[in-house]
Image: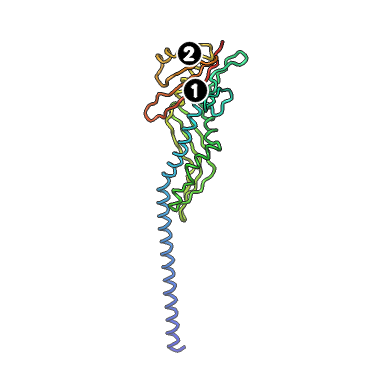
Amino acid sequence: MNKRGQVTIFIILGLLIIVIIGFIYFQRGKIISDDDQTQTDERFVTSQIEPIRKLVSDCVTTEAIKGIRKIGKQGGYYDPIKFEPVGDYNIAYGCYVNNGNNVNNLPLLSMISKEFDKYINSDSTVQEIDKCINDFKFLKDKGINVADSVRNIKSDFQYNKVGLNIQYPLVISKGDYSTTVDRIFSEIYIGMGKLHKVASDIINEECNGISFDIDSYIKNNEPIATIGMQYYQGKTYVYLSSITEGKEEPLDFHFVLENVS
């Protein structure tokens, strides 16, 4: 092979090496660039987790308060069986007479929790919550995708607050990065437990044939509720309103007593 041929081969090899090295550096730069973008997306998505939790919590809380108030005005029931219709509400009997016997119809606090769960997971309430969440539009406008699944909410009614366990699997993604949120917890300070205690004290006496004495009760017990009674056609309508403390939401609890002759 002559000298000119050798030079040509070396030139070709040199160019090939340059191309290979350039390709390697290009790919390496692309990988680094992709990694940087993924990290940027991760930071941005992570920064939106709390706003997502707050949006869901706020939307659920708004509807939850409506439900708690409705259930309070219906004697602890979402859908009472024995009741007196008054305005927009069906006020449940706290005590009624059946075959000559007094029946205590006040649900336990745990049963009120189950009544509330029926309300908060009902189709109509789910639609209102979805309307409020608005398909996470505020995130989609920022380039974040949110894929959600079926939502289920369980409650825990306590003395002066209600805990909400919102089971709501969400997949939040941007670019190549994604993360999940499974549960969101929320608390509403509202005195269903306080009013339930007063209602229980009244109903226990009335159902045992003892006429409830409002003045004596107020004098001898902590002031946690106002008590009003209205007598009409052999029935006593009882209206309780919570005396709030701190950030407690106001609440009413109504029920009917069937008077024993």
Residue at the spot x=50%, y=15% of the render?
231
Residue 249 appears at what percent x and percent y?
A: 41, 30
Q: Is residue 219 above or below residue 50?
A: above
Residue at the spot x=42%, y=71% of the render?
22
Q: Choose mark 1 or mark 2, whichever is in front.
A: 1
The quarter in which the C terminus is drawn is top right
Q: CA distance from mark 1 to mark 2?
A: 16 Å
Q: Earlier in the sequence, mark 1 or mark 2?
A: 2
Q: Is residue 102 above or below residue 87?
A: above
The reply to whether callout 1 and callout 2 are in contact (CB within 8 Å) is no
Task: Give amino acid for label 1.
Answer: His
Judging depth in this view, the residue of 49 and 134 nearest the camera is 134
Residue at disc 2, secondary structure: loop
Please say which color scheme the image uses.
rainbow
Q: Is residue 198 above or below residue 164?
A: above
The residue lying furthest to the right in this view is: 99
Judging depth in this view, the residue of 97 and 35 nearest the camera is 97
- The residue that label 2 is drawn on is 212
Q: For label 1, count other residues whose C-alpha is less than 10 Å away and answer few (under 14), some (14-19) or many (20+).
A: many
Q: For label 2, count other residues whose C-alpha is less than 10 Å away and answer few (under 14), some (14-19) or many (20+).
A: some
| Number of numbered discs | 2
Task: Give amino acid for label 2.
Answer: Phe
- The residue that label 1 is drawn on is 254
Res 92 label = none
Q: Is residue 106 above or below residue 163?
A: above
Say whether residue 44 is left or right of residue 203. Answer: left
The residue lying furthest to the bottom in this view is: 2
Residue at the spot x=43%, y=32% of the render?
188
Residue 99 appears at what percent x and percent y?
A: 62, 14
Residue 110 appears at what percent x and percent y?
A: 52, 27
Residue 199 appears at what percent x and percent y?
A: 48, 20
